[in-house]
Image (cartoon, helix red, strand yellow):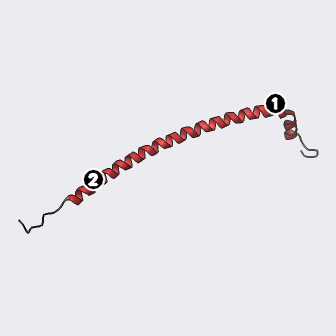
Amino acid sequence: MVGRHTPNHGHITHFVQGAIFSAIGSGINAVISAIANVFMAIVGAITTVIVTIFDVIVDILCCRCFGSRASNSRYRRRRGVY
């Protein structure tokens, strides 16, 4: 058996191991991406709520400070326009 060539299955083992590690890496990547997307959605919702509250406060302050001038100019009809 000195001259016979025995098949080497080492390259198949490396291919299978590479596929397994690639699948594990893809799964970890998917989980991390899902967590990041949920985190981004939460941050976006919190930001929207904060901006809305700020807008409401600014609207209330502007109505109290500039209410008579702003409301008259905004809702006043021009002469001759019906």
Crowding around mark 2 (Cα neighbors within 10 Å: few <14, some 14 to 19, many 20+) is few
Residue 9, position in %: x, y?
19, 59
Q: How many marks?
A: 2
Task: List the single residue furthest toward the right.
Answer: 79
Residue 49, position in %: x, y?
63, 35
| Left or right of 46 on screen, residue 19 | left
Residue type at the position of mark 1: Arg
Query: Which is more foreground, mark 2 or mark 1?
Result: 2
Gap in angstroms between the C-alphas marked 2 and 1: 70 Å
- SS for dot 2: helix
Quadrant of the drawing holding the N terminus: bottom left
Crowding around mark 1 (Cα neighbors within 10 Å: few <14, some 14 to 19, many 20+) is few
Task: List the single residue furthest toward the left.
Answer: 1
Residue behind mark 2: 17
Q: Could you say which quadrant of the image residue 56 lies in? A: top right
| Residue at position x 39%, y 45% in the image | 28
| Left or right of 63 on screen, residue 49 | left
Residue sitting nearer the eye, 75 or 29:
29
| Residue at position x 94%, y 44% in the image | 79
Quadrant of the drawing holding the C terminus: top right
Contact (Cβ within 8 Å) of mark 2 with mark 1: no
Residue sitting nearer the eye, 28 or 45:
28
Residue type at the position of mark 2: Gln
Residue behind mark 1: 64
| Residue at position x 34%, y 52% in the image | 22
Q: Earlier in the sequence, mark 2 or mark 1?
A: 2
Compared to 9, does 79 lie above or below? above
Compared to 68, does 37 lie above or below? below
- SS for dot 1: helix
Residue 70, position in %: x, y?
85, 37
| Residue at position x 81%, y 30% in the image | 64
| Left or right of 57 on screen, residue 29 | left
